[in-house]
Image (cartoon, rainbow, N blue to C red):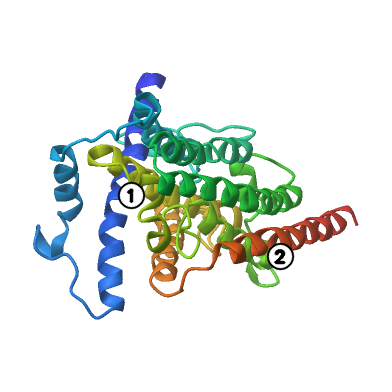
Amino acid sequence: MNDLLILLIKASVIYGGLLGTAALMTLAERKFSAWMQYRIGPNRVGPFGLLQPLADGVKFIFKEEVVPDGANPWLFRMAPMMAAVPAMLTVAVVPFAGGDIVLFGQNFGQLSITDLDIGVLFMLAIGGLGVYGVILGGWSSNSKYSLLGGLRASAQMISYELSLILVVLSIVAMSGTLDLRGIVAEQTGTWLLLPAWNVFQQPLAFVLFVIATFAETNRHPFDFAECEPELVGGFHTEYSSMKFALFFLGEYCAMVVMACLTTVLFLGGPEVPYWADAPWFLQLVAFMVKAGIFLFLFIWVRWTLPRFRFDQLMHLGWKVFLPLALANLFLTGLLVSF
């Protein structure tokens, strides 16, 4: 089979899975929140409400599109795409399984769109572009609430991006590579009778990284860019129809990508504990279970914890997380050196 055709098939499967997971996450969010609050949740469209994401998509397509007076029409239309596309691009380097995939006598290679020697840098660089869509969406709307939401998003991203990068650097220092598959390979085997995952060897880095992903994806309790009680709806106040849906598609895709990245960096990626030669389909199942735990955590935290004040958020980012991340990187460097 042609290499280009194999690449197109893998890209279609992976991006279809990403968009499908993001759509199902909107349903899972509503179902889990209903379960936590003793409500029923969506149950009218399809069995158990499973077709609700499809119904929402159709609803957004047929809604009226409105461009506010005084808005920058070009940037107003571009901002939702700039928020959604980076989150979708970063999934290209995620290794979902270890071995080659052999189906119907055809070897499809490893289950990732591409393998980059600088995969970690690619994910951080492209993933960090998503905030520009939020900033430009807030500024181009010609609304003070939207503008404040965009400014908050930029301040929040700068505060937590530094800590997140320093944490990732500590993992890179331990693994000695920027390749995501190389980082996964360094977590095989056992360490003190436990799987040799970085979550056990770098517990502080793991906690800092997981909390930083909440701020990176604008999720509760760090959703200050939209914060309804203060900013009506924040950066997306003036948006409607599919442009509004694209912002949230980007948010849920970013959640999926961050869950995948956490799995790769700290939980051994697709590795099955104590089974080094597990077949690729079991590795894929293991990866999905690990990532699913973090996706559930995103929902659980949203419907459990109250929102911080904005000054508390900035204090936590600059005066707590940044010093801890620097100290963790310094200690990691000492351990690697000696």
Residue occupying image coordinates x 59% and y 43%? 181
Rendered position, 99 above or below 222: above
Q: Farthest bottom residue? A: 38
Residue 288 falls in image quadrant = bottom left
Q: Position of residue 213 (x, y in %)?
A: 54, 56
Q: Position of residue 13 (x, y in %)?
A: 32, 37
Residue 243 falls in image quadrant = top left
Q: Earlier in the sequence, mark 1 or mark 2?
A: 1
Q: Position of residue 86 (x, y in %)?
A: 46, 36
Rendered position, 121 above or below 324: above
Q: Farthest right residue? A: 338
Residue 128 versus residue 147: which sits nearer the camera?
147
- Image quadrant containing the C terminus: bottom right
Residue occupying image coordinates x 35% and y 38%? 15
Residue occupying image coordinates x 70% and y 58%? 318
Amino acid tagged 1: Ala
Residue 239 versus residue 280: which sits nearer the camera?
239
Counting labels gives 2
Determine which residue is flagged by label 1.
22
Determine which residue is flagged by label 2.
320
- Image quadrant containing the N terminus: top left
Amino acid tagged 2: Val
SS under mark 1: helix
Residue 137 shown left or right of residue 153 in the figure = left
Residue 209 shown left or right of residue 137 in the figure = right
Residue 137 shown left or right of residue 126 in the figure = left
Q: Position of residue 56 (x, y in %)?
A: 18, 49
Residue occupying image coordinates x 38% and y 50%? 252
